[in-house]
Amino acid sequence: MTPDLKLQNHVATITFRRPQAANKLAPEDLPELIKHINTVNQSNDIRVVVLRSEGKYFCSGYDISEVKNSQAKGNSFGEMVDAIEQCRAVTVAAVQGGVYGGATDLALACDFRVGSTAAEMFMPAARLGLHFYQGGLERYVTRLGLDTAKRLFLTCERLDAREMKVCGFLSHLVEPDALQTTVQGLTDILGAMAPLPLFGMKKHLNLIARGLHNSEAIAQEVQRTVHSEDLQEGGAAWREKRKPVFKGR
């Protein structure tokens, strides 16, 4: 079954639904995931996207027998992962179990990765004879560092959950029974933020990490918030000791 999308309040949830195959991704999943992200980007209400999976594994990556079908321009695996990284909303991966191959890059494309102690990861591209695509190499280097990227790509070393947290792959590490409540708590925090700075700072922090930021564009985002209704609401709520109600204006 292709990944499912559900929208509720300020949160979108994308669920991988092939537990019997360790949530392996197939060719038809790539355009579906891109479509889901486009739906989120067109929704003014959605502030957070949660990526989750059914069953024991988060995702075992792309079906290696179909790898030649993962390079179609417009629907390639790399373009799908780039779409997740560039999603307007803040993205959270709920990593309850194993994450392998291209799925490690998919998780890295998310802004937060909340992992269970049952999680593990490895990147077997070199063992399979596959050279990874540019966007994935860049994400590994910018988010984990060059030495860690070399360790994982060139030796195909398997990391347990603790090592995933130490190297920076996981932003949070919790016991399995606390995973959902931790993800929910994080989405509640993010969903309560003012959309303009939330989306703007997410976008520009990612660009800064890649050395692609534009100072003028950042300044424009700053001015947009300075003159926003939400800044006035935030200040009023602070003074009145109440929760602000942000509208993205």
Image: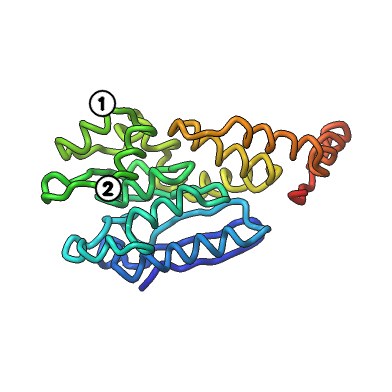
Image height of 218 relative to 195, above or below:
above
The image quadrant that residue 141 belongs to is top left
User: Residue placed at 27% from the left, 60% from the top?
Assistant: 71
In the picture, the disc for residue 133 is 2
User: Residue placed at 14% from the left, 44% from the top?
Assistant: 126
Which residue corresponds to mark 1? 147
Q: Answer yes or no: do the residues labelled 1 and 2 have beta carbons within 8 Å? A: no
The three-letter amino acid code for the residue at tag 2 is Tyr
Residue 77 rendering spot, x and y as whole percentages: 32, 57
Q: Which numbered disc flags the more N-terminal residue, 1 or 2?
A: 2
User: Residue placed at 46% from the left, 68% from the top?
Assistant: 4
Image height of 15 relative to 88, above or below:
below
The three-letter amino acid code for the residue at tag 1 is Asp
Q: Residues within 10 Å of mark 2 (few under 14, many from 20)?
A: few
Residue 6 rendering spot, x and y as whole percentages: 54, 66
User: Residue placed at 43% from the left, 56% from the top?
Assistant: 52
